[in-house]
Image (cartoon, rainbow, N blue to C red):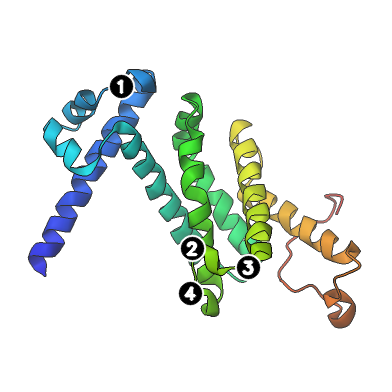
């Protein structure tokens, strides 16, 4: 067991060296001009070591994005999952902390690498929210549930993308307030939703909507 853990630790360190090397090179030159040999040289590894892990630099960049996607999921699980405010704050706080990484992807027109990881990540998050969903995969959800979920998750990504492009002028908490306010207004005006009429409260709390924001 100790030997296995040592091997896994070494593999993780080698991957980190290669990811760091690729991102450092992307700071210096066009992504299209980067060669595998440059990545391995920057990481101080043999070129054959690179190919033991990846077939191309695209696979390595996708791995960089997968690591961030997993970190986002972990961050959201550590927050108050049962309020929209808590999970939204965790979501935007992650992007604020990783804004340099996303700016680098944007500079090279490579944000789509992260988006490729995004849907699977969000379904993982959905499984963690409700105990009965733990054993489900994306295809186990109904078509309606999948599309509703994708609508919501890509709405969040659209907000994060716009926010990052405009220099993160708002705080994560402010964005979480906007989302909660949208949900409050939707429940309040949606005639088919009977929850508020029956219970005289919304099915989530706290709302944390600041007074004077036009809500």
- Name which residue lies at 83% across and 50% down: 213
* Mark 3 vs mark 2, CA separation in Å: 16 Å
- Is the residue under label 3 in contact with that under label 4 (CB below 8 Å)? no
Q: Which residue is mark 3?
A: 142
Could you say where residue 119 lies in the image, as x and y percent from the top left?
53, 52
The quarter of the image holding the N terminus is: bottom left
Residue wearing tag 4: 134
Left or right: 115 in relation to 153: left
At a point 87% along the width and 50% down the height, the residue shown is 214
Element under disc 2:
helix
Q: CA distance from mark 1 to mark 3?
A: 43 Å
Marks 4 and 2, the one that precedes in the sequence: 2
Secondary structure of the residue carrying numbered label 3: loop
Q: Earlier in the sequence, mark 1 or mark 4?
A: 1
Q: Are marks 1 and 4 in contact (CB under 8 Å)?
A: no
Q: Where in the figure is residue 162, as x and y percent of width and height?
A: 64, 36
Check disc 1 and report the residue beneath it.
34
Nearer the observer, 208 or 133: 133
CB within 8 Å, label 4 to label 2: no
Label 4 crowd (10 A; few <14 / some 14-19 / many >=20): few
Lower position in the chain sequence, tag 4 or tag 3:
4
Element type at mark 1: loop
Would residue 11 be found to the left or right of residue 31 on screen?
left
Image coordinates of residue 146 in percent, x first then y, are: 62, 61
User: Compared to 101, does 76 lie above or below?
Assistant: below
- Gap between marks 1 and 4, in whole Å? 41 Å
The crowd level at tag 2 (other Cα within 10 Å; few <14, some 14-19, many 20+) is some
Q: To which residue does mark 2 refer? A: 124
């Amino acid at each position: 067991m100790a030997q296995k853990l040592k091997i896994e630790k070494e593999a993780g360190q080698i991957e980190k060296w290669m990811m760091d090397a690729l991102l450092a090179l992307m700071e210096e030159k066009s992504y299209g001009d980067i060669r595998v040999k440059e990545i391995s040289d920057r990481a101080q590894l043999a070129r054959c070591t690179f190919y033991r892990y990846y077939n191309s630099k695209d696979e390595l960049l996708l791995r960089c994005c997968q690591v961030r996607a997993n970190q986002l999921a972990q961050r959201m699980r550590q927050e108050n999952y049962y309020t929209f405010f808590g999970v939204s704050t965790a979501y935007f706080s992650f992007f604020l902390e990783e804004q340099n990484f996303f700016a680098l992807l944007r500079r090279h027109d490579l944000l789509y690498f992260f988006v490729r990881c995004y849907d699977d990540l969000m379904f993982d998050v959905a499984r963690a929210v409700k105990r009965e969903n733990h054993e489900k995969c994306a295809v186990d959800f109904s078509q309606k549930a999948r599309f509703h979920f994708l609508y919501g998750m890509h709405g969040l990504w659209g907000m994060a993308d716009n926010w990052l492009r405009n220099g993160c002028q708002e705080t994560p908490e402010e964005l979480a307030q906007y989302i909660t306010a949208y949900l409050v207004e939707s429940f309040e005006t949606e005639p088919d939703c009977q929850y508020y009429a029956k219970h005289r409260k919304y099915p989530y709390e706290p709302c944390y909507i600041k007074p004077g924001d036009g809500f």
